[in-house]
Structures are given as C-alpha cells and as structure tokens.
Image: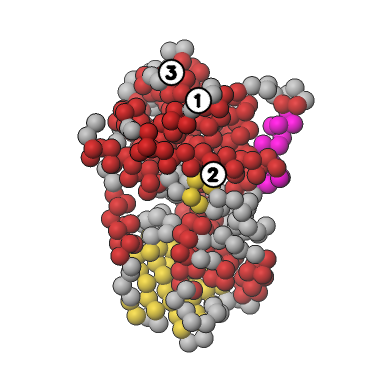
Amino acid sequence: MSNENTSLFIQWLKKEVAPALGCTEPVAIAFTAAYAAKHLKNTCEKISGFISANLYKNAMGVTIPGTSVSGVNLAAAIGAFGGNADKGLQTLEGINAHHVELAQALINSGNVVIDVQDTPDFIHLDLTLTAADETCRVVVKGTHTNVVELYINGEAKALPQQQSAADKNSTLPTFSLREAFDFITTAPAEDIAFILEAGRLNSALSQEGKNKKYGLNINGTFSDAVKKGLMSNDLMSNVIIDTVAASDARMGGAPVIAMSNFGSGNQGITATMPVVTVAKHLDADEDTLARALALSHLTAISIHSRYTRLSALCAASTAAMGSAAGMAWLFTRNLDTINAAIINMVSDVTGMICDGASNSCAMKVSSVVSSAFKSVLLAMKNSCASANDGIVCEDVENTINNLCRLVINPMTYTDKEIISIMVAK
C-alpha cells in the first residue's frame, strides 16, 4: 500500500475519531455560544439566533453533560456562562451548578430566543450574544465546531488559520472496506497505536455507567437479568452490557469524556466497546486490539462518509457495522467474513430511525450491537444474506451504497416528518 493511502487512513482516523464530552449536538450549541462569549468584554445578557432542524432533533431532549438538565436554550446559555470554546467538543468540561443557575435565570428573563430552521446544511448554527452595547455573532456549519463566520458589533472578522484548514480537510476521499482491511493488516504498529486511546476512554465511560445509574440504566437491567438467569452470562451479553453502559452514561450526562466517531459519542462507543470486549475475551495483545479498533472505526467512517452527517437513520447502526468488522477480524482475519457480517447487518437493521438524542439511544445501541454480534456468528458459518434478500447485493460495497441511497433520498422525507412530530410535542 502506498504511503499516500496510508496517510489518508491516518487522516480520517485523526479527523473523525476525537474526544467529546456529552452528546455532540447540545455541545455544538454550547460551543457556538462559548465562542461568541469569549469575544465579549462583558457578561452575556441575551442570546438569539437559530439552529438547523436536524441539530434541534438531537439536542432538545438529551441531558447536557455535567448537569441533570436538557434543552437547546439551556445548552446555549450554559455555554455562554461556563463553556470553553478552545476545548472544542469538550467545551462543557468543568461546568458546575452555578453556571446552570445563571443560564436558567437568563432563560427565565426571556432573553434566550433560539429558533429552528430547515437549512441545507444539517449542522447549522447561527447565534448572536449581546452584552451591554456589544454583540458577537457566530455561524457554525458542516461539523459541530466548524466556525465559518464571525461578526463583532456587526463587523465581519477574519477567522483563525486553523479553522480554514479544518474546513479544507472536511472533504477527504472516501475509501472501500478492502482498502481499510489492507491498511490495518500492513500498517506499522506505531502508526496506529494512537487508536488505543478510543478503547481507554470508552472503557472508562463504560465503567462509569456500571458504577452509577444514568438515564434508563439499561446496562443495569441487563446485568440484573444475567444474575437472575433471564439472560445468558456469555460473550454476547458482555458485549452488549459493556457497550450500553457507556451509552447510558454518555446520554445521561456523565461528566466523562467519550471517544467519538464521525462527530458522535454514541457512534464512537458503538465502534469501540464490542471490539474491546471481544479482544479481552480472546486475550489479544495491544497491537491486535489497535488493528481491530482501526478497522472498526475506519469501516464506520467509510459507510457514514457516503451519507449525510445527520439524518433519519440511527447512525449507531452503521457504527455497529464497524464493530462487526472489528469483531470478525479478531475472530477470523478474513475479509470475506467481514464483508458477510456487514451484509447481514444491512439485511437486519436497515431503516432504524433516529428520533433524536435521548436516554433511549442506549436501547438502540443494544439492538445494533446485538445485530453486529449475531451477524458475525452467521458470517463465520459462511451464512450470508443473498442478493435475493431485499436491498443487499453479493458485493458489500454495493450493499452499503444501497443503504446510503435510502438515507439520502426517501429517508430525507422521513426525517422531516420525525422532526415535525418532535416539534409538535
């Protein structure tokens, strides 16, 4: 494999597998407000503007990290009073009860007004903060922390160089699963060792979810079921519980960092924890784990890069296709088995909708991780959904493209209806 291709995969991993604190949609709102606040000399007195409908869908109901509250207005106000935009997706690290009190008081005074608009960019935020006679307007588009416009007292300001670079790097070439497989098979160990941080961070988040009750405490329910003999105490149960524990904690507002994938902590968790648990079961060494994690995250990236960053599809399902690839590689080192596992998953979970970030996301994570594990077991027995079955094809790349075609075309209308239902509530 050429050095150019090797560099591409490293670029993708370092760009899309990044630490994040809390659900990235409310964090994007907090980041935008915090970015504006740092350009004001005085304390924020008013917040106005709009966010895209898709971002609203994923921000309205999920717990803001480090708090027990939720809501778009609160995310913005908390970001304005206590956020640190220099930390990017970790903007809300260090938030405390005083920041929440200040935010709630600003909202109660009627000085936080954020509308929802149907915008071409699925991630689009346009917020203006006012303090005394100052204003700062910030526009974020494309990704959760990509500032594209800055206005201070109505005057456009040049953006720092690194943000132009970030925007430029947002259009990396896509790649196939075979190319990702070849990369992780041949890459020098030191080139991909950094991906082990995903395992460390998400394992710590999983442990946090087991130690305390967050959200619906789905992992606790499953663990109790195992103790009572209602679920088997086996590898599949361990894979599900370890993964869901991290999702419970993240969606329940735990102040613990996740390693995200494609801008989502849940996707990062789903692409990471099943692989970590299987690797531990197989007593795999760090080099083996790093290659499996790299394949999982690259597979998730390869699939998600073919459709929109936010959509009507629950993207934990495509992240779990990544973990299916990673688990299949750990068990077999065989590309055909990996491809068959992903085809089986497309046949199984296509169409699972995203109806916004919430505590119930952990339930969806449990479903797709279960599908991933079962799909790997089938693939290991050379059992694969055939080209006669629904949207799948004999070729895994065509199968993935068919899935993404559904997301980009008919599910666009599904997305609008989901948002309409949620806003009406």
Q: Secondary structure at mark 1?
A: loop
Q: Name the residue carrying label 1.
A: 284
x 32%, y 32%: residue: 187
Does 153 sit above or below residue 237? below
x 63%, y 46%: residue: 249
x 63%, y 26%: residue: 237
Give the number of the mark in front: 2 or 3. 2
Looking at the image, is mark 1 or mark 2 earlier in the sequence?
2
Q: Amino acid at mark 1?
A: Ala
Looking at the image, is mark 1 or mark 3 earlier in the sequence?
1
Q: Please give the range of residues in magenta.
A: 212-225
Q: Name the residue carrying label 2.
A: 201
Looking at the image, is mark 2 or mark 3 earlier in the sequence?
2
In terms of depth relative to the viewer, which is nearer, 325 or 348?
325
Does 158 sit above or below residue 30? below
Task: Give residue 176's position: percent from left, percent from top.
Answer: 30, 32
Query: Is residue 93 shown to the viewer in this render?
Result: yes
The stretch drawn in magenta includes residue 333: no
Q: CA distance from mark 2 to mark 3?
A: 26 Å
**Is residue 158 rendered to the left or right of residue 131?**
left
Q: Name the residue carrying label 3.
A: 332
Q: Amino acid at mark 3?
A: Thr
**Is residue 335 rendered to the left or right of residue 373?**
left
**Rendered image quadrant of residue 261:** top left
